[in-house]
Amino acid sequence: MKKDTSKTIITGLIFLLLFAFLLLCLLKVDVHRVAPFPAEPKLGLSSFNEWARKLIKSNDTAYEISQILGLLALAVCICFVVVGIYQFITSRKGLKGISRGIWAVWILYALTVATYLFFDKVFVVNYRPVFEEGLKLAPSFPSSHVLLGITVYLSASDRAGKMIDNTAVATLLSIICWLLALALLVARTLSGVHWATDIIGSVFLGIAYLCFYLLIAGDKK
């Protein structure tokens, strides 16, 4: 058990450091103005990001799929909020009646939301390579959809294995969650509404957050 905990801590720290290193590179390395926004704020790792954008281009269908999968992830969040409220009401123990696993999920959600607000409202690293409605540019790093998909779907996969007694059902749900997370990652990448480093950063941070979640949740239901 201690060995597993140590591995989780080390893995989480490694991916958190990778995210921090990527962020530093975006702020300091190969920072230039890029097409199609030569008059807009500069982009870090611009050569790599432009190369990746030309390679991947954009896809409206992938964008719509990523939007749907993002909304589905929000629905999963609501389900776990409802589960916690149900435990609170039925246990008659107040907040102590909410399981450790549900608290871990809620903390993970709070981290995800806080990250989105910080990089969207407080510290904007770069902007999307496409215009929003009204010819506005939206903050791009990290991709909130990819981060949401990793944290929500993969934590749901873990919860399914611990909360559902039927092994076959739990395994099936776990696999579905992993497939949804992968589908959202691929769809958002192919949609072309983010730079490659936005996606990579979300993967690094999402894995780090998941490790933190696993440390809080432990093996409890």
Image (cartoon, rainbow, N blue to C red):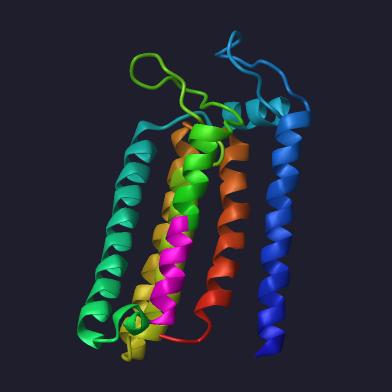
- The image position of residue 66, as x and y in percent, is 37, 44
**Depicted 26 relative to depicted 147: above or below:** above
Residue at figure coordinates x 69%, y 40% from the top left = 23
**Depicted 55 relative to depicted 11: above or below:** above
- The image position of residue 80, as x and y in percent, is 31, 68
**Could you tell me if residue 185 is visible in this image?**
no
Q: Is residue 52 left or right of residue 116?
A: right
Q: Is residue 210 left or right of residue 134?
A: right
**Depicted 145 relative to depicted 220: above or below:** above
- The image position of residue 52, as x and y in percent, is 62, 32
- The image position of residue 153, as x and y in percent, is 41, 63
User: Is residue 103 inside the magenta stretch?
Assistant: yes
**Given the current orientation, which residue lies at the most extreme right position?**
29
| Magenta-drawn segment | 99-110
Residue at figure coordinates x 50%, y 78% from the top left = 217
Main SS, magenta region, reads: helix
The image quadrant where one finds the C terminus is bottom left
User: Is residue 153 inside the magenta stretch?
Assistant: no
Please state the total of marks drawn on the protein image: 0
Residue at figure coordinates x 47%, y 63% from the top left = 108
**Depicted 9 relative to depicted 220: above or below:** above
The image quadrant where one finds the N terminus is bottom right
Q: In this view, does 214 lie to the left or right of 176?
A: right
**Could you tell me if residue 31 is visible in this image?**
yes
| Residue 187 image-quadrant placement | top left
**Given the current orientation, which residue lies at the most extreme top position?**
39
Residue at figure coordinates x 33%, y 61% from the top left = 77
| Residue 87 image-quadrant placement | bottom left
